[in-house]
Amino acid sequence: MARAARHSSLETRTARARLPVRRTPYFAKIAKGLRLGYYRGAVSGSWVASFYRGAKGYDTKAIGAADDTTDADDATVFDYWQAQIQARNWAQQQRLVAAGIVRTGPYKVADAVKDYLSEIAAEKKPAAVQGAKYVFDAWILPDLGSIQVDKLTTERLVRWRNKVATEPKRVRSKRTATEPATRATANDDDARRARKATANRILTMLKAALNRAFFTDRVASDSAWRKVKPFKQVDEAVVRYLNIAEIRRLVSACPEDFRKLIEAALHTGCRYAELTRLKYEDYNEDSGTLSVRLSKGKNRHVVLTEEGKSAFRQWTKVLQSGERIFLRSDGRVWGTSHQQRPLDDASQRAAITPPVNFHILRHTHASYLAMAGVPMAVIARQLGHADTRMTEKHYAHLAPSYVAQTIRENFPVLGLASSRQVIPLHKRSA
């Protein structure tokens, strides 16, 4: 980034207030062929950029109001330094247009999203692309879609991010519904943390689309969104897992076809989509493993316990090659999101509150491995994590701690709990 240019008469509102009112701007040269101008009005002033185009003379562009009477917001009111950045970004855009690198014409956030989805369609599975499209349609395009990318400001994007973090959670609704179904966000720290974590993920997707626009020269600067930071310390959710009694109640509360899926998730730690794709040949009875195919672009082998092997042996004994292990009772395959309503119903019958989601079954599998002292690297391999960072983030606190174990084994028993008599330290005077 170019070094900011100093100008003692324009840098501060105090210095600008001493300038005489005039109809022509006061200019500061901030780069070769680029000037930042300040119009001094009777009450307040405004900024303008002036860019030299050779024989064509100077092009000018109004930037916005100066912060003479109102604090700068980097959106409509700018201090000297913010106005300088706006001028540089505009000049760079003009250079790229002149060189034929940046295409002219309005390029909106909706256009950037459309181009981004077209690009990832060649790399990702259709379900992933559809999921991304849902996020853009639900959270990004309604508020930002009509804005030109080069008109975005950091302040506008921060307002949008904060709005997303306070909106109620969306839940699955009927296909005929005209309005999205929502669930009110609980007013507690964990619920607020979860909404901020969701806002961070949505912000990441928006930045991905806008970065593509920047890297393909549809816009000259990425400054507006690069300066928008995610919420801090909101990804450290307390991992929820089921105790043994809850596991048994939940399994007993499920209909037979769905019960198989629940049991398989608990035995393997696999994701819902991974289980519903399993076929007869993916179970290897000799090695006691499952071959999970195309799990986020990778294949992995999931190890089964003796109890898990017994279950899969029972489920596959009448199947043939090519047949799915898990089907609905009517013979249809389990589809996207078909799992949540049966889980809600089973959770209610099993008196488990709040209701279980399928990922909690995965957490349950991993949590019991961690509490048994299984190394994080082994758990990561079982779950299909690329490395141990995510595994340690969620499960390391459950692993037996050498420090805690040593302290508990060596600190003496004080016997305080057995004493019920309170002995005053000072004798009360008569």
Image (cartoon, grey):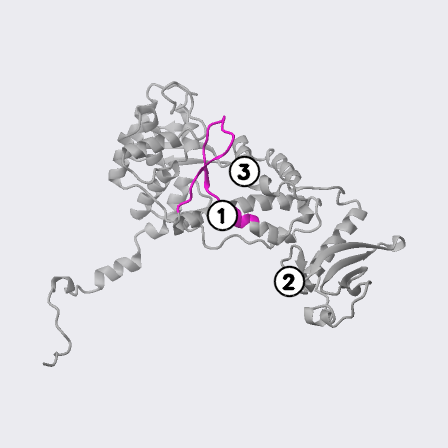
Q: Residue furthest bottom?
A: 429
The answer to whether the residues at label 1 and label 3 have Cβ atoms under 8 Å apart is: no
- How far is disc 3 from disc 2 in space, using C-alphas? 35 Å
Residue 146 image point, x, y percent: 65, 41
Task: Indicate the secondary structure of the residue bearing disc 1.
Answer: helix
Q: What residue type is labelled 3?
A: Ala
Image position of 109 with respect to 72: above or below: above
Mark 1–mark 3 distance (CA, rounded to whole Å):
13 Å
Q: Which residue is drawn at 58% across and 44% down?
A: 206
Magenta-colored stretch includes residue 94: no
**One can see residue 288 in this view:** no
Q: Which label was assigned to residue 70?
A: 2
- Neighbor class of circle 3 (other Cα within 10 Å; few <14, some 14-19, many 20+) is few
132 vs 370, nearest the viewer: 132
Which residue sits at x=61%, y=33%?
122
Task: Point out residue 55 in the picture as x, y percentages from the top left corner.
Answer: 90, 54
Q: Circle 1 is placed at which residue position?
A: 165
Residue type for callout 1: Ala
The three-letter amino acid code for the residue at tag 2 is: Thr
Residue wearing tag 3? 138
